[in-house]
Image (cartoon, rainbow, N blue to C red):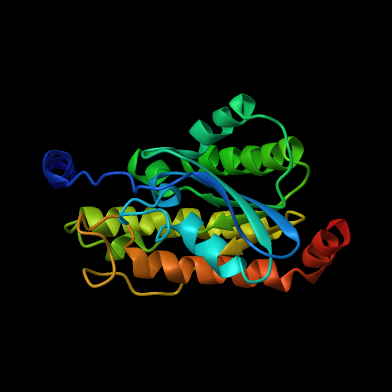
Amino acid sequence: MPVLLAQAAYLRRNVITLPDPEGDRKGTIGAGPPLRLLVIGDSSALGIGTETLDDALIGQIAQRLAPHCTVSFELVAKSGARTWDVVGWLDEMPEGGFDVVVTALGVNDVTKLVSLHKFLRGQSALIAGLRTRFDDPFVIVSGLPPVEQFPLLPHPVRWVLGRQAARFDRRLRALVDTLPNSANVRIDLGLGPHNMAEDGFHPGPEVYAEWAKEVVALIRARTDLLDGLRAKA
């Protein structure tokens, strides 16, 4: 425990603070039937680790969908956000419709020592709230990354946080598997200095691109969703 506390203090003093990527958090791109997309969550949803939102998760998803749909996208994200923080945002957001919502949360719940029980209750509340407020969208829940591979973290804190993140991820996937109109997304991509941001904690553009690729595959596999969009066009 003394070693873990010392490492935590060192990380707080020495972590690199990266700027928010530049770009519009709302916009429209593409051609074809209209699809309304929301990405919501923490700094990974925000795209920290990229220079522009075009290379972040929201931009990569929109660009990959653009040949098939007219994508109206919106990004609601903040660095440091935990699951229950985002649940609280919903009451402040205008009611309306989204066809697809992608969430990106969990790492801050782990690093800020949120209990597994509280995390899962928050995820359940978040998915239910998204479905109620935004006209029953298809909710894609991003899994937690392999924290034990983050270059920033020294051992043993890397091992401790990595085990906890893996535990959260397993239980989150099990939860989402029980819910209607929802899906898990995970990327099986080794993380390291070659594909992560310079802070050693956030994804780089290559990781965001692979993440977006998996999200789009889930959306395009939902033929009922796409047929419904075409019917409304």
Q: Give left or right: position of 88 versus 176.
A: left
In the rendered image, which quarter contains the C terminus?
bottom right
Please report the residue visible at 50 percent of the width from the left and 55 percent of the height from the top. 58
Residue 198 screen position, x and y as percent:
20, 59
Image coordinates for residue 14, horizontal then vertical, percent: 11, 44
Quadrant of the rendered structure where residue 199 is? bottom left
| Camera-nearest residue between 19 and 185 | 19
Toward the viewer: 185 or 232?
232
Q: Position of residue 99 (x, y in %)?
A: 72, 52
> Which quarter shows the N terminus?
top left
Task: Give the left or right position of residue 152, taking residue 145 as reference.
Answer: left
Instruction: Tell me if 166 is positioned left or right of 221 in this view.
Output: left
Which residue occupies 33% across, 58% down?
Answer: 162
Taking the spot 62% from the left edge, 29% from the top edge, the residue there is: 93
Q: Residue furthest right?
A: 231
In the image, residue 132 sits, relative to residue 88, either above or below, namely: below
The total number of labels drawn is 0
At which x and y percent is residue 42?
43, 44
